[in-house]
Image: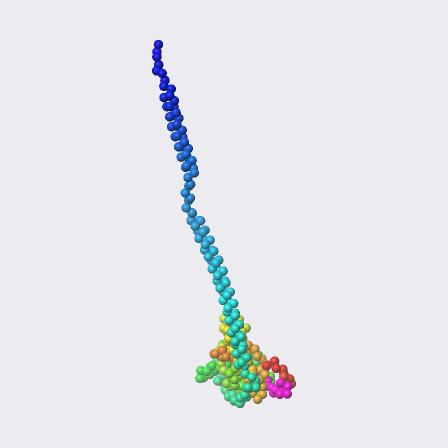
Amino acid sequence: MSTSKPVNLSAFLCCRFSICMTNFLIADSLIVAKLTDEVKPRRRPFPTPMVIGASIASLVVILLVILTIFFVIRRCLRQRISAKNEKLQLARLIHCMLIRVPAAHSIQPIPAPTVPSVELSSMKAATKDFHKNNIIGRGGFGIVYEGSLSDGQKVAIKRLIIRSSHADDEDEKAFDREVDLVSKLRHGNLVQLLAYCKDGSERLLVYEYMKNMSLNFYIHGKNPQLRATLNWEQRLEIILGIADGIAYLHKGLNKGVIHRDIKPSNILLDDDWRPKIADFGTAKTFIEDRTNPTLFQTPYESNLTNPFI
């Protein structure tokens, strides 16, 4: 009969409990480790170059928009200030103009000078036989040539247009009228007649040369640079000069002169931009009726009104 050792139940139970607890702790640590790994925040990736480029481009666009708005506002403010200054300057110049324009009764008549006659050959030499390259202007009564005299002086030579081999009566009258009138005129705002030529069918008038051409180029010309040449102050000075010249024509001689063709193309400008009235081919003299200042007596028309200058 065999005998077996009695089993220590308490020791067995303790051993089993220890093994179970060990397994539980190991499993628990694994679960915690897994959960910790899942909950742990991941590191964000560094922005790509495309994102950086887009951000910089957006910033540049915003800056450009801000700068554009700034310069537009600045320009508008400058234009307003400039317009205001021009208005103030214009008002001052108009005030000066009203003060400077001479009264008609204050102009004293000037004795009529004499104008010499010149040879046709000298005029042909001055204009290279009236070469087309010397033409500087055309009018209703003739063509104007640039000429150089033997002493080097530049002149403007007006050659009357002749419709036939013999001088037409109308052309002859226009020539004689212009010589007669302009030879008596001596004023800073009237073009000066230096000489004349009357040879056969040729009729020539020699005037002082105007370097800056006519006012028409600066008012109605096709060249935008020429149109922008004159500022408001210069334009008002030109208006003043024209007004002085017209006042002299009306009151500066024993018989007043009505130009009858005042327009920009008949206003010449010298080196200093001084205006000079030219082309007296259609001008007429008048005697003012003192009993009725609104009427004038002329050899050609019975009555002329004041606006007819």
User: Which quadrant would residue 98 be assigned to in this image?
Assistant: bottom right
The outermost residue toward the top is: 1
Q: Would you say the magenta stretch is mainly helix, strand or loop? A: loop
In the visual, does 234 lie left or right of 291? Answer: left
User: Which quadrant would residue 171 be assigned to in this image?
Assistant: bottom right
Residue 203 seen: no
Residue 41 lies, in percent from the top left, at 42, 41
Residue 166 lies, in percent from the top left, at 58, 84
Question: Can you say whether 263 is above or below 73 in the image?
Answer: below
- The residue closer to the viewer here, 201 or 241, is 241
Residue 220 seen: yes
Say which residue appears at 48% left-offset and 85% top-offset.
122
Say which residue appears at 49% left-offset and 67% top-offset.
78
- In reply to whether residue 130 is colored magenta, the answer given is no
Residue 100 lies, in percent from the top left, at 53, 81
- The residue closer to the viewer here, 256 or 96, is 96
The residue segment tinted magenta is 281-293
| Image quarter in which the C terminus is found | bottom right
The outermost residue toward the right is: 302
- The residue closer to the viewer here, 218 or 12, is 12
The type of colouring in the image is: rainbow
Say which residue appears at 37% left-offset and 21% top-offset.
10
Say which residue appears at 52% left-offset and 86% top-offset.
186
Residue 62 lies, in percent from the top left, at 47, 56
User: Which quadrant would residue 141 be assigned to in this image?
Assistant: bottom right
